[in-house]
Image (cartoon, rainbow, N blue to C red):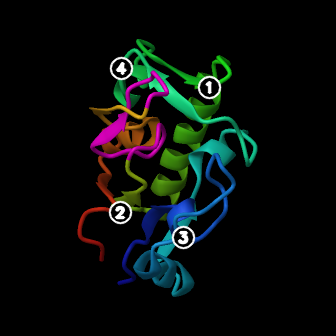
Amino acid sequence: MKKAPLLVSACLAGQRCRYDGKEKGCPPLKDLVARGAAVPFCPEVAGGLSTPRPPAEIQGGDGADVLAGRARVVNREGKDVTAAYLAGARAGVELARRLEVRQAVLKERSPACGVKVVHDGSFSGRLRPGRGVLAAALAGAGIAVRSEEEKNP
């Protein structure tokens, strides 16, 4: 029986898709992608945002609150980009279901991929406990999520 692939934040797989046009490559994860054991995914790009793009943060809660309609994602210029984050999260869950993914390794502190902490919405560098929008959506779909800062496969 073939093992289900791991879903990984595309920036951790070496793709230049972060808001600043850079990547945060993680060699073990890049190796898993190269071997076909992991699938890279960027929810911001999947949701229609460009690279580079203004940084965004969740205001009024965390990713679970965005999914519930109680919070929104706003970029530094004041533009509400919640719809793009929701679209990217939906696409990520659909991909994970199609590939029978059981776990994901995501980029900590991202408004989409943060697993344990996200920025607090003030663009001041402060963090608060909570998940990003994709991380919350994947967890809600029964997929185990962990940060690249935790032990990797």
Disc 2 to disc 1: CB gap under 8 Å: no
Q: Which residue lies at the image location 38% right of the left edge and 26% below the top edge?
A: 120
Q: Residue at x 44, y 23 (%)?
A: 121
Q: Which residue is mark 4?
A: 61
Q: Residue at x 46, y 43 (%)?
A: 110
Question: What is the x, y in percent for residue 68?
Answer: 40, 18
Residue type of the residue flagged with mark 4: Gly
Indicate which disc residue 76 carries. Answer: 1
Q: Residue 119 lies in magenta, yes or no?
A: yes
Screen quadrant of the N terminus:
bottom left
For the residues carrying marks 2 and 1, which lies nearer the camera in this image?
Answer: 1
- Position of residue 84 measured from the top left corner of the image (x, y, whole percent): 64, 31
Residue tagged 2: 148
Q: Is residue 149 above or below residue 92?
A: below
The 10 Å Cα crowd at callout 4, few under 14, some 14 to 19, many 20 or more, is many
Q: Quadrant of the C terminus?
A: bottom left
**SS state under label 2:** loop
* Amino acid beneath label 2: Glu
Helix or strand or loop: what does disc 4 sit on? loop
* Three-letter residue code for mark 3: Ala
Q: Please tell me whether mark 1 sits on a helix, a strand or a loop.
A: loop
Q: Main secondary structure of the magenta part?
A: loop
- How many tags in the picture? 4
- Few, some or many C-alpha atoms within 10 Å of disc 3 (few <14, some 14-19, many ≥20)? many
